[in-house]
Image (cartoon, grey):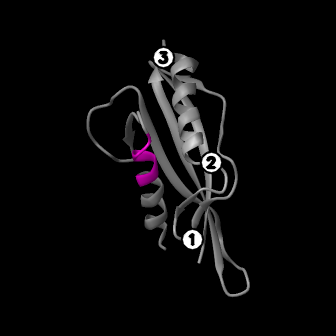
Amino acid sequence: MTDEDVIRACYDRLETMAGAPAIKWPNQGGAVELPRIEMQGFANEPQTVSLGGTHRRRYLLQATVVVAEHEREWTARGIAENVIARFGWNVAIATGLRVYRRPYSSPGFNDGPEWRLPVTIPVEVIE
């Protein structure tokens, strides 16, 4: 499974979340919608760890919930809780890909006319 496959599988799982707002990735054009989820994925432990014949790679998927500034925590928290529930601890996302630690949110913050609430989703591939 490539890095792109990992991110794609996570995106597919998030996209099927009931009531999911628009999902945006870096460098993706189009109209800016509110609310939305901005996604980023990156390797947490870029080196492969050998597990007696299998290999493990870990990633952090960042899902930032973005709402209008006046909505703040209330709307953002509801969406963030849905994202966290969608990626519960030990959930199998695809063959060999699972959530290895419970997702968590960080403190929200203002960003001009928007309120942002980051959610971190730790996933790992074992193959």
Residue 105, percent from left and from top: 64, 36
Q: Which mark is residue 69?
A: 3
Residue 3, percent from left and from top: 49, 67
Quarter of the image where the C terminus is located: bottom right
Q: Out of 86 and 121, give the one closest to the viewer.
A: 86
The mark closer to the camera, 1 or 3, is 1
Q: Is residue 114 visible?
A: yes
Residue extending furthest toward the left: 30
The secondary structure type at the circle numbered 1 is loop
The magenta span reads: 12-17
**Distance CA(mark 2)–CA(mark 3):** 28 Å
Residue 92, percent from left and from top: 57, 60
The residue drawn where x is 73% and y is 86% is: 52
The residue drawn where x is 64% and y is 79% is: 55
The secondary structure type at the circle numbered 3 is loop
Q: Which mark is residue 40?
A: none
From the viewer's perspective, is 42 left or right of 55?
Answer: left
Which residue is under mark 2?
Answer: 88
From the viewer's perspective, is 106 left or right of 71?
Answer: right
Three-letter residue code for mark 3: Glu
Three-letter residue code for mark 2: Gly
Residue extending furthest toward the top: 70
Which residue is under mark 1?
Answer: 96
Alpha-carbon neighbours of circle 3 within 10 Å: few (<14), some, or many (≥20)? some
